[in-house]
Image (tube, rainbow, N blue to C red):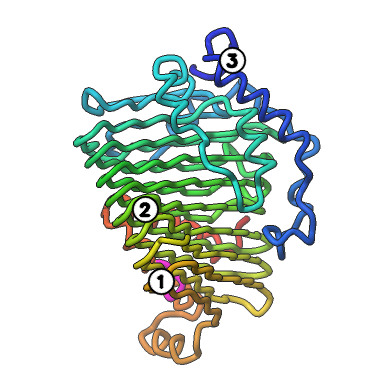
């Protein structure tokens, strides 16, 4: 089992950063109700009193057996409470694909060059500091120039035990004209043990490279999770990030995409299906630094019962980032009269000759749609489920990989089946 356990084996820069992060966490104030980045948020969810670092005794054999995903992968890693319990790697020579704990020792300078380099600016700076101070493991991938990873790298993150905290980290760096796809899957070992997950991923897409990242959040509904994503794209690079939210009592997603090179592209995609009392809080920032870059955000939420969503997104175009092409869309499908969707899309443009649009819609399923399906022998409950699934598919199809799309849709179908059965 591999984890960050001994400061004597770690590079000095990392231990210094962890110490500084601990001090920063303790000094930073907790979010307040009048903070714009926490508008509409339920701040009671940030009380982590009584939660401790995850225990080391985990049911490894059972969790490995339950870590189903794509079936065929370029590499597969299974972590439980941030401990590596299983790994298999089939990547070509020259590609670095290691647990972060190992990469810190064997590729220290490479990790240092990219580890948590951006400023966390969407509200969770305090919790990013806690993550940095506490991170014990995760995935590190470096794809050299003109290299393509054959297949997908799949990572399973399990949380075990009651009142435990875990801090998974994913760091992916692509060289010039390279390509890689990584999938993170977050789950709980059982349905009754509350946990807190503070996850962070760094994605750095090099010149003319393609980097695809998928996060499937399916922890149990008595747990909470904060996911922070920081993405940078160099000249002519393409980065695609997809988030699926189906688990957790409360989830906070913060996604910042920084387009640093001319001709670069960022696709930010999400599907969220909250039910019962679940609450999903998503904040995004499309930062256009260089001219001639393209970004497109599509977030789709299907809300059931007394669930709640919050979306706050901003397209920010720097001075000099002319000929920017940017889009931002959040769509909410209200599946009950008691759910609540809050959407706050925004634009700030400081350049000329740009093409930017943003918007949000919220609606219920029309009676005509239900009637059409009922006339073909489909019962009302099933009809509403089919419409909600079709509503989600638009974002899923943009993954442009059949196996990945099928995996995501399997999780979506499981959630719809859970809702239909009234399960928790």
Q: Position of residue 124 (x, y in %)?
A: 65, 47
Q: How many residues crowd mark 1 within 10 Å: few (<14), some (14–19), many (20+)?
A: some
In the orientation shown, which residue stands out farthest toward the top?
A: 8
Q: Based on the picture, tell me whether residue 390 belongs to the magenta stretch.
A: yes
Which of the two discs, 1 and 3, sits closer to the camera?
Answer: 1
Q: Which residues are magenta?
A: 387-392
Q: How many residues crowd mark 2 within 10 Å: few (<14), some (14–19), many (20+)?
A: many
Quadrant (top left, top right, bottom left, bottom right) of the C terminus: bottom right
Task: Classify residue 291 by image quadrant.
Answer: bottom left
Q: Is 45 drawn above or below residue 97 in the view shown?
A: below
Q: Position of residue 394 (x, y in %)?
A: 37, 68
Q: Is 36 drawn above or below residue 330 in the view shown?
A: above
User: Marks 3 and 1: in contact by CB < 8 Å?
Assistant: no
Instruction: Report the front residue among 321 and 238.
Output: 321
Q: Earlier in the sequence, mark 2 or mark 1?
A: 2
- The disc placed on residue 240 is 2
Question: At 75% from the left edge and 40% from the top edge, which residue is drawn?
Answer: 28
User: Marks 1 and 2: in contact by CB < 8 Å?
Assistant: no
Q: Is residue 23 visible?
A: yes
Give the residue number, with chain letter if any, for mark 3.
5
- The disc placed on residue 352 is 1
Task: Classify residue 22 by image quadrant.
Answer: top right
SS class, disc 3: loop
Q: CA distance from mark 1 to mark 3?
A: 51 Å
């Amino acid at each position: 089992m591999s984890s960050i356990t001994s400061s004597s084996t770690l590079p000095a820069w990392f231990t210094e950063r962890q110490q500084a992060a601990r001090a920063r966490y303790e000094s930073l104030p907790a979010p307040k109700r009048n903070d714009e980045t926490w508008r509409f948020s339920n701040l009671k969810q940030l009380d982590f009193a009584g939660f401790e670092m995850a225990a080391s005794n985990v049911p490894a054999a059972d969790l490995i057996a339950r870590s189903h995903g794509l079936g065929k992968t370029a590499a597969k890693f299974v972590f439980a409470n941030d401990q590596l319990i299983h790994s298999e790697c089939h990547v070509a020579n020259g590609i670095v694909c290691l647990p972060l704990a190992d990469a810190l020792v064997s590729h220290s300078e490479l990790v240092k060059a990219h580890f948590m380099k951006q400023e966390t600016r969407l509200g969770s700076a305090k919790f990013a500091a806690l993550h940095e101070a506490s991170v014990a493991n995760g995935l590190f991938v470096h794809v050299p120039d003109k290299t393509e990873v054959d297949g997908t790298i799949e990572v399973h993150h399990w949380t075990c035990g009651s009142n435990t905290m875990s801090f998974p980290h994913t760091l992916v760096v692509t060289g010039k004209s390279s390509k890689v796809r990584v999938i993170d899957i977050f789950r709980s070992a059982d349905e009754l043990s509350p946990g807190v997950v503070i996850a962070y991923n760094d994605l750095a897409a090099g010149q003319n490279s393609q980097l695809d990242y998928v996060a499937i959040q399916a922890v149990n509904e008595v747990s909470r999770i904060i996911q922070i994503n920081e993405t940078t794209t160099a000249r002519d690079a393409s980065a695609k990030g997809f988030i699926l939210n189906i688990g957790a009592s409360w989830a906070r997603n913060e996604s910042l995409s920084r387009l640093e090179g001319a001709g670069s592209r960022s696709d930010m995609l999400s599907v969220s299906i909250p039910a019962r009392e679940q609450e999903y809080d998503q904040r995004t920032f499309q930062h256009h630094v260089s001219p001639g870059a393209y970004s497109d955000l599509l977030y789709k939420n299907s809300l059931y019962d007394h669930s709640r969503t919050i979306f706050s997104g901003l397209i920010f175009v720097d001075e000099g980032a002319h000929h920017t092409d940017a889009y931002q869309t959040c769509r909410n499908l209200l599946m009950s009269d008691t759910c609540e969707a809050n959407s706050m899309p925004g634009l700030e443009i400081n350049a000329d000759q740009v093409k930017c649009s943003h918007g949000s819609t919220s609606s219920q399923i029309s009676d005509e749609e239900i009637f059409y399906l009922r006339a073909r022998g489909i019962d009302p409950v099933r009809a509403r489920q089919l419409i909600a699934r079709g509503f989600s598919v638009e974002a899923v199809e943009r993954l442009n990989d059949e196996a990945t799309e099928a995996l995501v849709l399997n999780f979506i179908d499981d959630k719809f089946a859970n809702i239909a059965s009234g399960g928790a």
